[in-house]
Amino acid sequence: MGKSKTEVKRALKFPLIEEAAQAENSLFHSAWEVPEYINKNLVHNIRPYQIQALNNYHFSQVQINPSKQHVLFNMATGSGKTDLMAALILYLFKDRGYQNFLFTVNTNSVLLKTIDNLVHANSEKYLFTKKIEIDGKRIAIQQVTRYPRFQQANTIYLKLATVQDVSSDLFTVKENAMGLNDYEHAPVAVLADEAHHYSASTKSERENEHTWESAISKILAARDTVETYEGQKNLLLEFTATVDFEQESIYNKYQDKVVYRYPLSSFMHDGYSKEVKRIETSASDDEKMLNVVLLSQFRKYWAQNNNVTSTFKPVIMFKSAQIAVSKKINKRFNEIISRLKAKDLLRFIERQELLDSNNNAVLELAYKYYLENKDKLARIVSDIKHDFDAKNVLNANDSTESNILEKGQYKILNTLESPNNFYRVVFAVAKLTEGWDVLNLYDIVRISEGAATSKSATMVEAQLIGRGSRYYPFELNGEKSYKRRFDNDPSNQQLILETLHYHTMNESQYLKQLRNSLEQMDLPTGKDSKNPPVEMKLKAEFKKTDVYKFGKIYYNQAINVPESYFDSIQKYGIDHRLDIQRDLNYSSQEVDYMDNDVITSTKTISINRFDQRYIEKAIHTLDFYKFNNLKKYVPCISSMREFIYGEKWLNAKNLRLFLTVPVEYKEENLTADEILTVMINLMKEYQLKIKSGYVKQRGTHKFIGYPIKNYLSDYNKRVPKYDTQTEFDKTQDIKIYEMADDAYYVYEKAIVNRLEYQLIERVKGHIQQLRDKYQKAVYLFRMDETMHRESAKSEYLKLHQFQKDPKCGIHLTGYQPDFILFLEDTNNFYFQIFIEPKGMSGKRFESELWKEELLLYMTNHQGEMEFTEDEANVRISGLKFYTDGDGRGTMKQLLELTRHTSSNDF
């Protein structure tokens, strides 16, 4: 009996990877770290898995097998293979003495993208710093069609060509072509991308003199017999995300060559991709098209309302099986948009809500948003017609790749994230499965007409999903992240901002085949469905207690803030000074939100050329500062002139600019565009603070008790369900736990993540100790957001800042901690302790620290709290965040508080 696919996967072994790990950990081999000349000459910070790939390659060359010429990097789509290539070019140049490099790939689109990455220093996609320096010497990268016979020092010669051209030059005699002797003269390192295309001879198990594979093999072996050989042979470094190791001939070819593997599941688990969910529907293609437009526009509105950069633009792709169908559907889409009316849209949404075919979570959120804004549907339709007008729709279905390039579609397709690129929709068949580096693709719609359900068809779909899952580093509260932010966030932000949705048909045989293809790619996806809700019921025994019948939970009162309060820019929490101090972003460093700050030698210079014109231009660049919009958040201004020049506002005529720049930088190096960019970034920060600071309620010292029976109730909660799981599937962190035997927990079940359950178990471990002192009641309340949304009075259940000068800034929005520990002793003394688990880290964690500051402030400033006269026997406290790293510390604080607090204190 033959092995199953799973058994074949488990049997795969790659000795080079194992030997590299042993060499790296061996006490008998020299330690090696990525050289500083690599770190400082690349625009992006090298990610941990890329560092491991470099380590493996170094050890394979230096300690395992110095004569190893041919290796393969098997890495997920979107994981930065070209960044790794750039690092390897520097490594091979400096440490191994290679000056000649050949980059080859099978498509012109990938070739052009890579030329931008490795050659064009003025491109936004360029991966090296503009000045490459190694050991104090300036290194030049020179693009060539043929390597020079006499080569200059400190120069990297880079030839970039399709494998078709490379092969043709070798096998066809023609003038000025690079023949085999050119690869003999000096050592060449070949960087072969999309390497799964270079195994035709291997797959057919017969020799063929004129295949791409044989061409690359001849180049690799060109110096093997050169008499003047001085220790350097040609090298071949292959890169691919897609390699079929289940095919025996392919596995045998690469078994001893795979130097590093980073599968898609690892890439997703580590947080560098979007989550992926499927929307399986029986809706027609017309209905799918309108649904996805509604969803895409909802994403845009959500982003605008949640402090995401104003340039956030989610893109849709419609995937057809045939060009004729794609063009037909494109025409139909334009008709649907042009004829759309508010009343028809409302009727469509109301009908869709009733259909089982659209039984999914994210569309439910979108429908709810539109139904709650019925009075604005005319404006919403106007926005849709503008954003999805035919001029913002691209049909990338030319029959040849050269036509796509000639029409300029290549640039459009690879700059979809740019603020100056207004395209929202792409129609395509199969041109975009390789070489399309799109980040802001959020929806892929499979058009049913003419679509196949074969294994090859679903594998193409799976590859496209993998490419579309690249993470989009949008700005949130002025901060960029290159990893997912919301893995431990119970809100819907991940579903909307960090999830790629694949809209497909609901047909069992097709879905089975698609899931098989996704599993073969090791790509975890889930069905985005409104799973049957779990009923969260309060325990009957708890409902019989006096705590439930007569007890209260306490929150501080919020009072209305009149519009007249917001009479200066400082009232929005903006520390606006006449001397503006900013950093010049002189390079585009990728800094992960968990990374420490990069240390660079700098100085501060005064910018004498700066004046109010830069403020005016920056404001005119941003839609937020159009007067009719700004007035919604800044009601006290009478004109834009007052906002720009008023002493209480920007006071633009009196501002001075100071920039922190690299030590070698001079003011004359500074361009007007760079000064303008600094001001635009400043005004973007002010925009976020103005929007978040304009809140019409603020907290007071007065705490009010709310009846527990009115705020703890039965409710329904849905749990995400994934059906193509991998060992890294983080959504399984959220589970249902039976709590029937735990009397201290008031609900029959707990639907919580791992950290929250850890907290529940920690509290359980101290229950008897707590009951010894608080004999009347010890209960843990889960204050679930879902329950609050179902409660008509949920707006009361928030804590608001009441400190005079909070260190973490003013936050007027308030928030609800996840848990309350409710304690009562025999003297009717109530002790209520707020507890907040927090699993995030980095800058996202720092942005939440104001919540921890508020919790601790309550504990340390009991005298500032006010209660009514009959509630003098109440104490309210909060703990520091319960985290993975310091859960024990939080519990120690809890025990200290409860040990020293009793009715005797009052």
Image: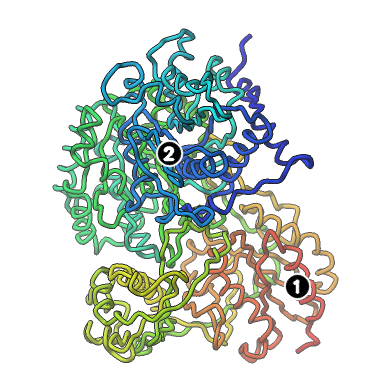
Residue 322 position within the rendered picture, expressed as x and y whole percent measured from the top left: 25, 26
Query: Residue at (39%, 31%) from the top-left corner?
Result: 104
Task: Name the image quarter holding residue 430.
Answer: top left
Q: Secondary structure at mark 1?
A: helix
**Total residue callouts:** 2
Does any portion of residue 767 appear in the rendered image?
yes
- Cα gap from disc 2 to disc 1, whole angstroms: 44 Å
Where is mark 1, residue-wise?
A: 893
| Residue 162 to residue 866: above or below | above
Does any portion of residue 691 appear in the rendered image?
no
Residue 747 position within the rendered picture, expressed as x and y whole percent measured from the top left: 65, 57
What's the residue type where badge 2 is placed? Arg
Q: Mark 1 and mark 2 in contact (Cβ < 8 Å)?
A: no
| Residue 482 to residue 528: above or below | below
Which of 98/194 is in front?
Answer: 98
Task: Name the image quarter holding residue 638.
Answer: bottom left
What's the residue type where badge 1 is placed? Gln
Residue 23 position within the rendered picture, expressed as x and y whole percent measured from the top left: 71, 37
Left or right of 819: which side holds 418?
left
Residue 278: mark: 2
Left or right of 69: which side holds 458?
left
| Residue 119 to residue 748: above or below | above
State the quadrant of the N terminus.
Answer: top right
Query: Residue at (54%, 43%) from the top-left corner?
Result: 91
Residue 431 position within the rendered picture, expressed as x and y whole percent measured from the top left: 30, 32
| Residue 149 to residue 842: above or below | above
Query: Residue at (16%, 37%) from the top-left corner?
Result: 331
The first of marks 2 and 1 along the sequence is 2
Mark 1: few/some/many CA within 10 Å (<14, 14-19, 20+): some
Mark 2: few/some/many CA within 10 Å (<14, 14-19, 20+): many
State the quadrant of the C terminus.
Answer: bottom right
Task: Name the image quarter holding residue 574.
Answer: bottom left
